[in-house]
Amino acid sequence: MRYIKELTDNERIVDFYLCKQRQSFKSQKTGKNYLSLTLSDKTGSINGKVWDITRDIQNFSEGDFIKIDAMVHTFNNELQLNIKKIRRAEEGEYDEADYIPATDKDVNKLYERIKEFIASVKEPYIKKLLTNIFIENKEIADKFKKHTAAKAMHHNYLGGLIEHTVSVAELCEAFAAHYERANRDILIASALLHDIGKLKELSDFPAADYTDDGELLGHIVMGSEFIGKEAEKIEGFPHQLRSLIQHNILSHHGEFEYGSPKLPRTLEAFLLHCADDTDAKVKMMETAIDDNATNSVWAGYNKIFARNIRKTEY
């Protein structure tokens, strides 16, 4: 198989890819309809255009594995496909493992790190809450190891959620050691739980798309509600402690414009936001550098950061 990350300019490819997105537009220049596709495999994704919708473009839908005949071109400094032929793939023509990107970390070791964090918590109610969710609930434990952390922005691959969660918890551990006013147990619990709602916000691979509740409610609200319900199951769980943890979840995106219904109002909430934001943006920058296939020290203009990113090869 010719992986997307291996493609080069002016190359012809005839291979199978997963159609993640299909959109139809009308060209302002010609007045003809054309298709804009997002195709993916485990190494990444690429935009493809079908400028001429002929009988060689057979019926297919989003979520289908398709066989394409296309030319690779560079457009706006990014590779793009000019697709001439498409048909649905048949069973046995592809291996799903080629189309599911996955973390390069050992998820079992990451899960053991989560258990280490839980064991280190001294506050008994917090420890019980985390134990019930991550250790006693086998369904959540199994899903948490496999789930993606996002649809597209960062850690958007199998095991991305647990990789991101452990990384945020490690940052929060460092923050708690550095800032003596921070409540370590609350901060660590919030780090482990901050994206728990993504188990319901995003569907499983290969679709890895927003669920209905994900679109209507989002992982922040669903995560806070879930934690509230889990806390209610623990007899005597302090109301204020529950509210403090829920507030951290509700505010961890930091700003209203980024989806947080509350702004961080406690030190722990602000530190959690900083850790989450840092880990997400560092991963996006690393991905931008890794995805650049040129020998240039400059990885190219990045739309998310609105700047050209340089590799540090010194």
Image (spheres, rainbow, N blue to C red):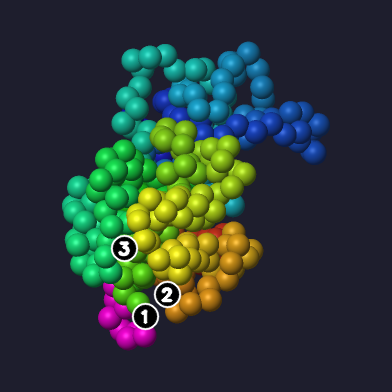
Q: CA distance from mark 1 to mark 3?
A: 18 Å
Q: CA distance from mark 2 to mark 3?
A: 18 Å
Q: CA distance from mark 1 to mark 2?
A: 6 Å
Which-is-in-front pick, marks 1 and 3? 3
- In depth, the one of 119 and 203 nearer the eye is 119
The residue depicted at 50 percent of the width and 28 percent of the height is 63
Q: Secondary structure at mark 2?
A: helix
Whether pointer 2 and pointer 3 mark residues with C-beta atoms closer than 8 Å, the reply is no
Q: Left or right: 125 with respect to 306?
A: left
Where is mark 2, residue-wise? 268
Q: Name the quarter where the C terminus is drawn.
A: bottom left
User: What residue is pinned by disc 3?
Assistant: 125
> Which numbered disc, 1 or 3, marks the residue that appears first in the sequence?
3
Mark 2 vs mark 3, foreground winner is: 3
- Residue that badge 1 annotates: 182
Residue 63 drawn above or below residue 135: above
